[in-house]
Image (cartoon, rainbow, N blue to C red):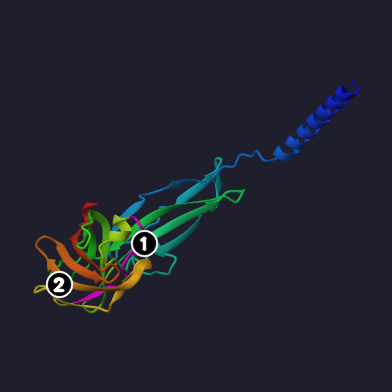
């Protein structure tokens, strides 16, 4: 009987300790937080000819129905940019990021894209926004209708491409912007006769290496540009076809 009594006492004591422990461990850990809820006025994606005024329609954010503060940041996606307003005098894709944080410190954000586009006639000017087909000759991988590549004039008859492998890794394989081949330029000696020079060399994003444009041709009638880029990373040859976009039809 004595052993049974001790056993009962231990069980009761253990139950008390367990109950106390559970209450203490679970105390104040169940809580509801309301993440920022955003409402964007105007279009999320905007296409504007160079020099056209852009008015930011704004974004509001609420936390459980109560409006909270929204901050805004603007970055250039295709080409470097620093500023607090979309630069309508410089072709680029501008990303406006609206951010808010709730009272518990949980952040949220939404983005608006603004394309400022200079569209050349492909006879005297090759600027523009382009969809792109990108093929790697060495391994047969093919991507078609990727959105978008931009060409802008940087000085005289020299033009810069936002991605000199036609979005192959960024848009095709979905590796992201860090894998674009940026910094590539071509100089038009005579667009009508497809007389271009290329250089200097450039890398392929985070992969690095050395890449060069080795051919470049414009067809004004079909609004297309075809070019090839050699890269020592494979080595690979990227065959790219760009088709100029009429942004007024988007």
User: Which part of the image, by quadrant, shows the N terminus?
Assistant: top right
Q: Would you say residue 39 is visible in this rendering?
A: yes
Membership of 225 in magenta stretch: no
Residue that protrudes farthest toward the right in the picture = 2
Contact flag, marks 1 and 2 (Cβ < 8 Å): no
- How far is mark 1 from mark 2, CA to CA? 30 Å
- Identify the secondary structure beneath mark 1: helix
Q: Would you say residue 183 is visible in this rendering?
A: no
- Identify the secondary structure beneath mark 2: loop
Q: Provide the residue span drawn in magenta.
A: 174-187
- In the shown orientation, is residue 122 left or right of residue 162? left
Mark closest to the chain's N terminus, 1 or 2? 2
Q: Which residue is mark 1?
A: 177
Q: Which residue is mark 2?
A: 124
Pick the front one: 97 or 52? 97
- Where is residue 129? Give x, y as percent: 24, 61
Sort mark 1 into few (<14), some (14-19) or many (20+) by Cα contacts within 10 Å. Answer: some
- Where is residue 250? Give x, y as percent: 24, 52
- In the shown orientation, is residue 95 left or right of residue 29? left
């Amino acid at each position: 009987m004595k052993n049974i009594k001790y056993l009962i006492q231990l069980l009761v004591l253990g139950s008390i300790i367990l109950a106390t422990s559970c209450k203490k461990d679970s105390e104040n850990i169940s809580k509801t937080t309301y993440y920022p809820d955003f409402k964007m006025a105007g279009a999320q994606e905007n296409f504007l000819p160079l020099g056209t005024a852009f008015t930011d329609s704004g974004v509001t954010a609420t936390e459980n129905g109560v409006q909270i503060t929204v901050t805004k940041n603007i970055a250039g996606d295709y080409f470097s940019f620093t500023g607090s307003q979309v630069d309508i005098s410089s072709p680029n894709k501008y990303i406006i990021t609206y951010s808010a944080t709730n009272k518990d410190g949980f952040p949220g954000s939404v983005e608006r894209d603004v394309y400022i586009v200079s569209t050349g006639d492909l006879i005297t000017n090759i600027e523009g926004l382009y969809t792109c087909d990108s093929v790697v000759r060495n391994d047969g991988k093919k991507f078609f209708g990727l959105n978008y590549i931009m060409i802008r004039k940087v000085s005289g008859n020299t033009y810069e491409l936002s991605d000199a492998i036609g979005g192959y890794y960024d848009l095709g394989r979905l590796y992201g912007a860090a894998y674009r081949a940026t910094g590539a330029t071509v100089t038009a000696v005579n667009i009508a006769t497809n007389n271009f020079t290329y250089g200097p060399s450039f890398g392929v994003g985070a992969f690095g290496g050395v890449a060069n444009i080795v051919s470049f041709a414009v067809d004004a009638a079909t609004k297309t540009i075809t070019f090839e880029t050699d890269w020592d990373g494979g080595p690979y040859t990227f065959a790219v076809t760009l088709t100029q976009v009429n942004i007024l039809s988007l």
